[in-house]
Image (spheres, rainbow, N blue to C red):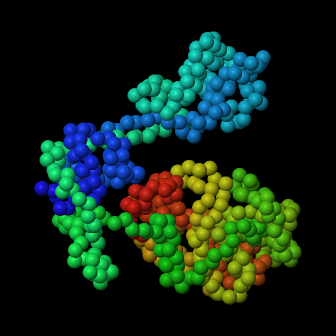
Amino acid sequence: MVDDNLVNTERRMLKAMLADSSKVWSLSDILTACDWQDQAIAVGAGLGIAEKGYAEVSETVTTEVKLGAQGQLALSEGLLEARLWDWFKSTSEPSMANLQESFERHEAGPGIGLLKKLGVTMDGGSFNCANESDVTETISARQGFLSKLPAVISEVDDDLLNHFKNRRNFVEFVDTTTRTWMLTAEGAQLDSSSLIETTMINEITPELLQSEAWKDADYRRFDVTLESATPRTGRSHPMQSLIERIRHIFLEMGFSEIVEDYVQTAGWNMDALFIPQDHPAREMQDTFYLDNPQTIPLPEDVMEKWSDIHRTGGDTGSTGWGGEFSKETSQKGLLRTHTTVNTIQYLADNPNQPCRMFAVDRVFRKEAIDRTHLPEFHQIEGIIMEEGANLQMLVTTLKTFYAKMGYPEVRVRPAYFPYTEPSLEIEVKWRGKWLELGGAGIFRPEVTEPLGIKHPVLAWGMGLERLAMLVLGLDDIRQLYISDLEWLRNQPLI
């Protein structure tokens, strides 16, 4: 007896297979016999009739080795070691200096290592090879290996495969599943004339009930005792969730948010904050200076005030930094290195209006990428400017913020920053250890007085990514920006 719960695709596949009930049916056989174009339909129908006991499915997984991006490049332009070897044999003086002139820097360095592994030695800055025929044979074998790809993994040389597996993006592995179907004894006894395709209702809709069609329709049966799949729903990225949580805390504490441009001048980014023009942080290795705009005009009177403060200290009682002050340097365009550049401009525009402001935004520094550093990251910035603001108010505000973030144990210790005095470093207790999360202090007179600010300004800042690493229990900052869906799905709600 035919199962009433067979869907039309299953009925068609069974009917086709009954034409030769002892045959082992391949995917192409099923597609042809059933007049289907989409192999997913055949695989789904085959799974359905197998679950009902009418057919057996056999699966064979074959691994194929294919060229990766670097492998394709090597095949079209030649292996790096092959080009180096051609150079070695054709040049009259195979020296290190000549190698660096003949090849780009990104090829010369790795190329020396490849030649050494092939048996090429270096003596006094010159390359030598005792057995050239072995090197030629090895390189030829490597080129031949790449030219034969793609190939089934069982048909390729294991040693050469292991060699290229250790070279990034040279080879890739693709698994291909081949399926065949064969009727079981129960399936072979079915009557093909009873396998009639019908209109099957999968979902009862208001439109169906309003018509008369439901009276004569066939309905698909569902086993309500089976476990249902957990639906995957959209959710915020952990970093975005953390940003929103921080915003909520600041707003709850009576702060307002500042959002400003990434592109700023060196004047507002550094001169306004009393960072000397010969400070190491201004060098190209720390700051992204721009070609467009290379310069951004600044008001002459503002630059004069900065110049006076930097050279002599102005009327603040400071001696300044001495030396010369360059207005051209002040007007250089750059990507901001901290969000303080925006808060100081806000204060300059509102020098007499008490305020509590915060920013959570991107900053840019020319950092080498590693487990704790990125060239583009987020900074959390906060300021309080009002009459009577003092160090105790700053410490209390910081402790309140971190307590709301879930870190009730906070301590501060003396530190040094060019634009605050006194200056503090903020530490929180995490897993029994004290971890430094940011800096804080009161803006120096050299920062506030040239801009007409009369009240004390409390300021603090910290890296958002470092805080995220604590909250999410990470030891590598790069994990925050890798599109690992499984990791993202398993993150707790922040």
Residue occupying image coordinates x 57% and y 35%: 71
> Nearest the camera: 381 or 18?
18
Residue 317: image quadrant is: bottom right
> Nearest the camera: 85 or 479?
85
Residue occupying image coordinates x 52% and y 28%: 148
* For residue 346, side relative to residue 49 (left or right): right
Q: Position of residue 371 (x, y in %)?
A: 52, 51
Residue occupying image coordinates x 66% and y 58%: 365
For the image shown, how many numbered marks are present on the structure? 0
Q: Position of residue 469 (x, y in %)?
A: 47, 60
* For residue 30, side relative to residue 437 (left or right): left
Residue occupying image coordinates x 74% and y 63%: 334
* For residue 218, side relative to residue 76 (left or right): left
Quadrant that contains the C terminus: bottom left
Pick out the residue farthest to the front.
Answer: 193
Residue 486: image quadrant is: bottom left
Quadrant that contains the N terminus: bottom left
> Nearest the camera: 386 or 168?
168
Q: Position of residue 228 (x, y in %)?
A: 26, 64
